[in-house]
Amino acid sequence: MNIKCCGAIVCAILLKHSSFGQTPAEPPSVLAPIVRGVSVFAGTDDESLPLIIRDSVDVEGKPVRYSNYLTVQFDVMAPEPPPLKIRFYHCDRNWKPDESLFVQDQNHNTSFYLDYRVAPNGVQQYRYRYVNSFPDANDAVRFDYSGNWIYRIMDAKETKVFSEGRFFVVDRLTPTMVTVDNDYLTANPSPLNQTHKVEVRVKLPDEIDGFYYTTVDIYQNRRFYDAVRIDAWDKNPYTFVEGFNTGTRTFSITNIHPGNEYRILDISNINRYPNRQLVKPVEGADQQRTFWRTGPDRNGTAVMNRFTGINSDYLDVLFRLDLTDTDYRYVTQGGRKIFVVGQFNDWSPRREDSCEYDEVERSYVNKKLLRRGIYDYQYVTGIWDATAESVLQQDWVILEGNDWRASNSYMVFVYFNDPRFGGFDRIVGFGRGSNVVSAQSSH
C-alpha cells in the first residue's frame, strides 16, 4: 500500500523518571533517519540506464514528449516516515550545477511529497521503501532542458544531504553511431598494450550551427564518475575530431583499457546466505586476476528488485582480497590503497571503501551492508586525497587484468552549448556501442 509522506516528524524521545537518588532525566534526542540502497534507473527495470529520452522538443528546447521516466528508489530506517525531499539540478558538462535561474526552474525542481510503503514483515534493516518517478503526473517536477542532472535526497530543512547521484536527459536531435575496435598501445607492456578504440559519428542538424558541437563524453559501463572526454579544443594525443566542414562530425579515442569482466557477488539465495548472518562468499576470498579471464558480467549493473518480501532485507557482506601469492608492495607502494567498487557506491571509490589487511582472514577486507541481490564489483587502487575528498591516480587494471575479450558497453553523450541565457550545456545525442555489438542511438 502506498502512503504519502506529508512531513511527518522523525523523533524518538527517551524518558527517564527522575527521583531522589536516581539519574536526572536526559533531554530528548532525535534519531536521524538512515537512507540506504539508493538506485536510480529508467522505467521499472533496475538494470536500465538512468536516462530520460525526449523524442520531441519545441523551438526553445523544452520537451513535447518523453519516451520514458526516471525512477528514484531507496530504503529508510527510521521510527516514523521522515520528512524528506528530492531536489534536482541541471549541470554543465563538468557536472557543476548551473547558476542561471532560466535553466534552474526553482518552481519545478523539487519533490516535497514522496510515495513510500512499509517494509514487509520480518525485514529488519529498513522500515520504509520509497519509490518515486519523475517527471511526475502532477508536473511538480519536470526537466525543461536536456543535459547532465544530479539529484539530492535531503531532509525537509535541507540541513543534510543523505544521497546524491547522477542521471541524463537526452534530446534525440543528432543521430549518433558508435563503433568499438581493438587497438594497440605499443609503448605499453602486455597486457596493458591492449586498448579499445571508440569512434563516434554524429550527424549534425541543419538548423543548428555546428560550431557549438565540440564535445562528447564516453562512459564505460556504469562508471558515471569517470568520463572519457573527446573535445575539439583539448591537446590529448589520443583523441581526434574531424569533419568540421561537413554535416557529419567524427570523434575518436584510442587508449581506453577494456579491463576484465567484473567479479560477481550473488547473495540472492536465502538458503545459502540467511538473513542476519555475515556473508563470506562460499567460493572463498578473491584473488588477483592480472592474467585471468573470467565469465561474462552484467556490465556494471545490480539486480535487486526481483527479490521481494523477506528476501528484500540487507546483509553484512565481507569482501576479501587475498594477496598471499602476490608481492602486495607494488600494489600499495606510494601510499596507494585498495578499494572495492560497484553499484553500491556508484562505481566511485570513497574513503569508506578502502580495504584493510585483516590478520585473521589473511586478506584485505571491507564490510558492507548490501541489499540482497546480484552485484558486479571489482577492486581499484588509488590514493585517498582528504582535501579533494576523492581517490586520485586510480588504477582499474593492476589487480583485475586487461583483455580485449572483456565485454564492455560504451555510452556516448553529445553535448551542445546552447548560447541562450549566457550559455548552457544540453545533450542532443546519445549512442551506445560495444566491442561485441555496435548500436545506433540505442537506449
Image (cartoon, grey):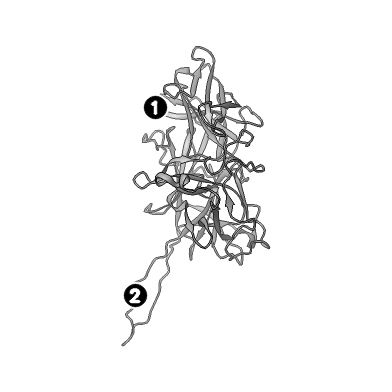
In this rendering, would 41 be left or right of 166?
right
Marks 2 and 1 in Cβ contact (< 8 Å): no
Describe the element under mark 1 as helix, strand or loop.
Answer: loop
* Quadrant of the frame with the N terminus: bottom right
Q: Position of residue 82 (x, y in %)?
A: 46, 59
Q: Residues within 10 Å of mark 1 (few under 14, many from 20)?
A: some
Q: Position of residue 323 (x, y in %)?
A: 53, 51
Marker disc for residue 26: 2
Q: Position of residue 286 (x, y in %)?
A: 58, 52
The residue drawn where x is 55% and y is 30% is 193
Count the marks.
Answer: 2
Q: Residues within 10 Å of mark 2 (few under 14, many from 20)?
A: few
The reply to whether residue 115 is visible in this rendering is: yes
In this rendering, would 23 be left or right of 77?
left
In this view of the protein, which residue sits in the foreground, 98 or 346?
346
In this view of the protein, which residue sits in the foreground, 72 or 320?
320
Q: Which residue is mark 1?
A: 423
Specify the amino acid type for callout 2: Glu
Q: Position of residue 224 (x, y in %)?
A: 50, 39
In the rendered image, the vertical position of residue 62 relative to residue 16, given as above or below? above
Residue 127: image quadrant is bottom right
The residue drawn where x is 59% and y is 55% is 285
In this view of the protein, which residue sits in the foreground, 351 or 289?
289
Q: CA distance from mark 2 to mark 1?
A: 55 Å
Marker disc for residue 296: none
Residue 191: image quadrant is top right
Specify the amino acid type for callout 1: Gly
- Given the current orientation, which residue lies at the most extreme top position? 245
The reply to whether residue 72 is visible in this rendering is: no
Describe the element under mark 2 as helix, strand or loop.
Answer: loop
Mark positioned earlier in the residue sequence (2 or 1): 2
